[in-house]
Image (spheres, rainbow, N blue to C red):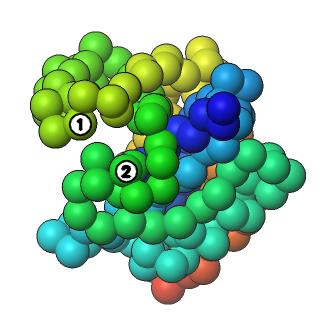
Amino acid sequence: MVTTAIYAGSFDPITRGHEDLIRRSCEFVDHLVVAVAVNSSKRALFTTDERVELIRAATTGIKQVQVTQFEGLLVDFAKKIGAKLNIRGLRAVSDFEYEFQMALMNRHMSETFETVFMVPSVETTYISSSVVREVAQHHGNLEGLVHPVIATALAKKFAGSRQA
């Protein structure tokens, strides 16, 4: 029996923390769908298509990973692709309350869809997409925070914002 899991998020952009969870998830699932959420109410730095391509670039070589986008309820998407597990990362205690609520709501809507909470590696605990965007906007050093392909994409996005 093939175990399919979903790791969903906005990934704007994907960070080394996300990559860490992806790699570690692949140690206990056969197929991991990294699903970029389409959220029209959120103003993203990268388009959904750009995020999908950046994730593909950052996860090249991890054979279990498939990258796609989805819209709507996660439980509906999970049912559509046959996923039984939802991978969620918890960087801090403050993440837990929201993630716990979402896990309970997903269980309410689909009793067969389980959420697995993972803590990041010590080296990536402090990394978030919003912090990475802030560092990139001010042309800071992104080494260790994101894959080099993502660092290049961020530099291009913020190329015109150099401050004197």
Q: Residue at x 28, y 54 (%)?
A: 76
Q: Name which quarter of the figure residue 133 lies in.
A: bottom left
- Marks 2 and 1 close (CB-CB < 8 Å): yes
Looking at the rendered structure, the kind of residue marked 1 is: Ser
Q: As displayed, is residue 75 above or below residue 22?
A: below
Q: Which sits in the foreground, 88 or 94?
A: 88
Residue under circle 1? 110
Q: Name which quarter of the figure residue 96 lies in.
A: top left
- 2 or 1: tag closer to the N-terminus: 2
| Horizontal side, residue 59 vs residue 46: left or right | right
Q: As displayed, is residue 33 above or below residue 91?
A: below
Residue under circle 2? 79
Task: Return the x and y of residue 30 as percentages of the image width and height.
Answer: 70, 36
Task: Return the x and y of residue 40 as percentages of the image width and height.
Answer: 21, 74
Q: As displayed, is residue 103 above or below residue 132?
A: above
| Horizontal side, residue 7 vs residue 102: left or right | right
Q: As displayed, is residue 91 above or below residue 82?
A: above
Q: Which sits in the foreground, 51 or 131?
A: 51
Q: Residue at x 50, y 85 (%)?
A: 160
Quadrant location of the N terminus? top right
Counting every numbered tag in the picture gives: 2
Q: Which sits in the foreground, 14 or 73?
A: 73
What SS does tag 1 mark?
loop
Query: Is residue 11 shown to the viewer in this render?
Result: no
Task: Return the x and y of residue 28 as percentages of the image width and height.
Answer: 67, 23
Q: Residue at x 73, y 64 (%)?
A: 57
Cα distance in 3D space between marks 2 and 1:
9 Å
Looking at the rendered structure, the kind of residue marked 2 is: Lys
